[in-house]
Image: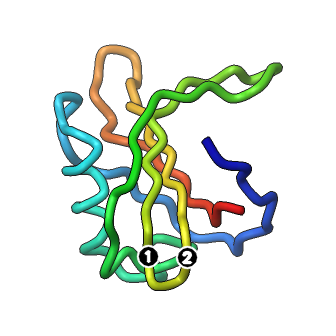
């Protein structure tokens, strides 16, 4: 895929993507595109094109599984990692992280 930069991002209040577990990566990114940059904590998603979607896993010790979405934007390539949030038996929406790709 791509190497992800290890950049420090300011703190922001995290708000999960409130879509069902059956939501597609395209639907999740579209929901994020409607948020303001202060809600996203990184960059705005307006004017993007999805160039790749695939499953990825972080390196140990975490070894978390995500769906990675590579976006082409006016600010360059960005990567969005998506992960379902399950709180016991309750659905918690979708966790996401955004990165600049190198």
Q: Which quarter shows the N terminus?
A: top right
Q: Which quarter shows the C terminus?
A: bottom right
Q: Residue at x 67, y 70 (%)?
A: 11
Q: Position of residue 32 (x, y in %)?
A: 32, 64
Q: Position of residue 58 (x, y in %)?
A: 69, 29
Near mark 2 (Cα within 10 A), the count class, few <14, some 14-19 or many ≥20, is few
Q: Nearer the viewer, residue 46 or 11?
A: 46
Tell me the quarter of the picture where residue 76 sits. Answer: bottom right
Q: Residue at x 56, y 29 (%)?
A: 56
Asked if 101 appears above or below 45 in the picture, the reply is above
- Whether the residues at callouts 2 and 1 have beta carbons within 8 Å, the answer is yes
Q: Give the Cα separation between the discs numbered 2 and 1.
A: 5 Å
Q: Position of residue 63 (x, y in %)?
A: 69, 20
**What kind of element bears circle 1?**
strand
Residue named by callout 1: 73
Q: Position of residue 22 (x, y in %)?
A: 17, 29
Q: Residue furthest top?
A: 89
Q: How many marks?
A: 2
Asked if 68 appears above or below 99 in the picture, the reply is above
Q: Which mark is residue 6?
A: none
| Colour convention | rainbow
**What kind of element bears circle 2?**
strand
Q: Residue at x 62, y 61 (%)?
A: 99
Residue named by callout 2: 76
Q: Residue at x 77, y 59 (%)?
A: 5
Drawn side of residue 73 relative to residue 12, left or right: left
Near mark 1 (Cα within 10 A), the count class, few <14, some 14-19 or many ≥20, is some
């Amino acid at each position: 895929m791509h190497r992800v930069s290890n950049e420090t991002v300011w703190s922001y209040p995290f708000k999960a993507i409130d879509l069902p577990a059956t939501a597609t990566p395209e639907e999740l990114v579209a929901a994020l595109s409607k948020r303001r940059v202060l809600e996203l904590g990184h960059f705005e998603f307006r004017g993007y094109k999805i160039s790749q979607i695939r499953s990825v896993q972080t390196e140990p010790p975490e070894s978390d599984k995500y769906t990675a979405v590579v976006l082409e934007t006016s600010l360059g390539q960005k990567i969005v990692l998506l992960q379902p949030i399950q709180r016991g038996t309750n659905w918690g929406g979708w966790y996401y992280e955004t990165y600049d790709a190198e």
